[in-house]
Amino acid sequence: MTTTATGVFSERIGRIEISATMAVTAEAAKLRAQGAKLVDFGAGEPHFATPQPIKDAAIEAIQANFTRYTVVSGIPELRQAIVERHAADFGSSYTAEQAIFTTGGKLALFNAIQVLVDHGDEVILPVPYWVSFKDIVQYAGGKVVYLETREAENFRITADAIEQAITPKTKAIILNSPSNPSGAVVSPKDLERIAHLAHERGIWLLLDECYVYLQYTGALVSGGSFTDAKEHIVVLGSLSKTYAMTGWRAGYALAPKPVIAAMTKLQSQSTSNTASFVQKAAIAALRGDQACVGTMRADYLTLRDEILAGLATIPGITCTKPEGAFYVYPNVSQYLGRPGVPSAMELSKRLLHEAHVVTVPGEAFGTDQHIRLSYATSHADVEEGVDRMKAFFGKL
Ligand SMILES: Cc1ncc(COP(=O)(O)O)c(C=O)c1O
């Protein structure tokens, strides 16, 4: 047990930290409450409203009193809708029993790791990584094995690099493509090789595909479509970004039946089912017209190019070109070490307080020379935010 000034907590809770992105959001909210007009590049969520048919389906469900407990893993119609959508978009062949609906993609990931990773198990995690991966692995008692990538290669993850990181203790590999925070995409060839490699070695491949529909180059690929390797693949999906549904808490996992059964058992002892009417909304999202997904993706692509063009006008800042998701991950190392800027963390804080621009420091993602900017915001805010940053960096 860990004893702290405020009480006695489990050793487990001492292994994790509060999500850094949530901490930034909280600090920004404080400033906003004081009347500051912030440009928010911090939050990783769509600026779009949830499409109307999805909202209508939830309202209809509530009016029809579809407001009771449901089965833990999601109503059959929803699990069927999940696998049908995935099959139509990626050519996969999951059955409804190989799907579970969860309270956000984050819970799908949390539950999958809890049921697969034991004390001392190694989990390979490419850097930079989304904030929650390492904490969730550590909470389960696992040991994170960080796999460095090269900025000069667009933070690309290759099958060769993964293979070299495997040891007899490797239990799982986490891949997040397109990546939060770098926007890097694993090439279909590498993804296929990694899937087969994992399968041959009996290692779990956890694929966080929450940005799978937000890819700007090449065909959309899901690791779940490599059917000959799927015995060791767990696909973690989310409706949050695809359909602008972050607050609804709607995610899922696709995996072999015993994994889904174990995740269901765990969920039955924690959150139980996801809100009943959210399940109806999710069916509307998955079965409805998908044009909204393409419309949003097209806007993100324009926003990406606008923010990249803007950042290119700030002397000393360089930035890789993201191939997906809605983040840019500029390198700010030229400014670090100047008076009052000892770290990316401090730089982010100063950007918030002095320029009223919200960003997330790279330390949260495992690198210390970058800041992350989410461009899921208005075109006007991208322009204004870049102007503010230009003025701020000009004075450093
Ligand atoms: C890589 C990644 N995975 C999972 C999630 C969680 O998404 P959800 O809202 O479905 O829990 C996020 C959210 O930002 C994310 O960036």
Image (spheres, rainbow, N blue to C red):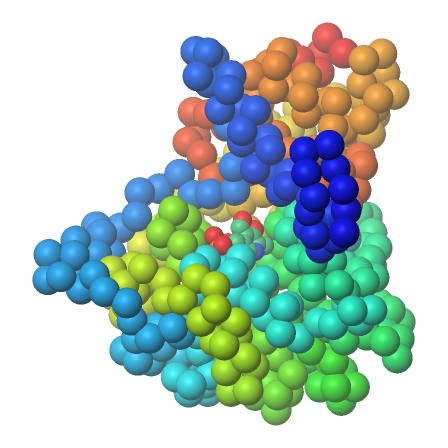
Q: Is residue 218 visible?
A: no
Q: Position of residue 208 (x, y in %)?
A: 58, 64
In percent of width and height, residue 186 lies at 67, 64
Q: Is residue 304 above or below residue 128?
A: above
Q: Residue at x 28, y 67 (%)?
A: 69
Measured along the vertical axis of the image, is residue 275 above or below residue 14? below
Please tell me how many numbered marks the rendered image carries.
Answer: 0
Residue at 74% across / 72% down in the picture? 118
Camera-side residue: 90 or 263?
263
**Percent x, y for residue 343?**
81, 26
- Seen as rendered, the residue at the extreme top is 395
Give me the residue at 47% from left, 83% from top: 98
Using the rendered view, name the quadrant where residue 164 is placed: bottom right
The residue lying toward the viewer, choosing from 380 and 92, is 92
**Quarter of image, res 114:** bottom right
**Where is residue 179, by image quadrant?**
bottom right
Q: Is residue 357 visible?
A: yes
| Quadrant of the image containing the C terminus | top right
Q: Residue furthest left?
A: 64
